Amino acid sequence: MEVYREILPDSYLLMLTSPAEPADAIHLTQALRWASQSGKRSIWVDCSQLPALPPSSLRVLLRYYQRLRRRQIPLVLCHLNEAARHCLDALPSAQRPPMVASLLEAEHYCRFTHPLLARAVAA
């Protein structure tokens, strides 16, 4: 998996692309580490170019979701395939990162829906 990074004004975007490789989790972990240290208010992960999200990558995303949540930084997943969405839907809501259909919805979530960021925007 290739991980492309795009630094946006308020967010850090990671775009995951195929093909799947054994080192997927390592590349994703490194990209999420850089994103979490960027100082951006939110991190978006675009999965639109992945036919399937490998289980090892899904575990990395869940682990980083918990870490970032403690730091009050939302991690939002975009364009998930049906299998990954179904797997995440089986988790308790407190362990499940937000899943949206598009990057526009990710921006809307972070700006208006996420409890901590929405308060900062309103102030």
Image (cartoon, grey):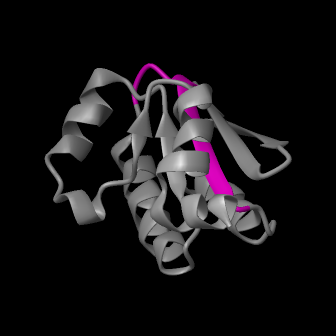
- In the displayed structure, 3 sits above or below 121; it is above
* Residue at 25% in and 45% down: 88
In-front residue for pair 79/113: 113
Residue 65, compared with residue 25, is above or below; it is below
Q: Is 114 left or right of 58, judged from the image as shown?
A: right
The x and y percentages for residue 45 are 58, 42
Q: Residue at x 80, y 69 (%)?
A: 39
Can residue 30 be seen here? The reply is no
Instruction: Look at the picture and state if 9 lies above or below 66.
Output: above
Task: Classify the position of the N terminus by image quarter.
Answer: top right
| Residue 73: quadrant of the picture | bottom right
Residue at (28%, 34%) from the top-left corner?
85
Q: Indicate whether residue 51 is drawn in magenta.
A: yes
Q: Quick check: 13 left or right of 17?
A: right
The percent position of residue 63, horizontal first and vertical second, equals 42, 67
The residue shown at (31%, 34%) is 84
Q: Position of residue 23 (x, y in %)?
A: 57, 49
Residue 103 at least partly seen: yes
Q: Main secondary structure of the magenta part?
A: strand
Does 23 appear above or below 83? below
What is the magenta range?
A: 41-52
- In this rendered view, identify the residue nearer to me: 118 or 71: 118
Residue 103: say if magenta.
Answer: no
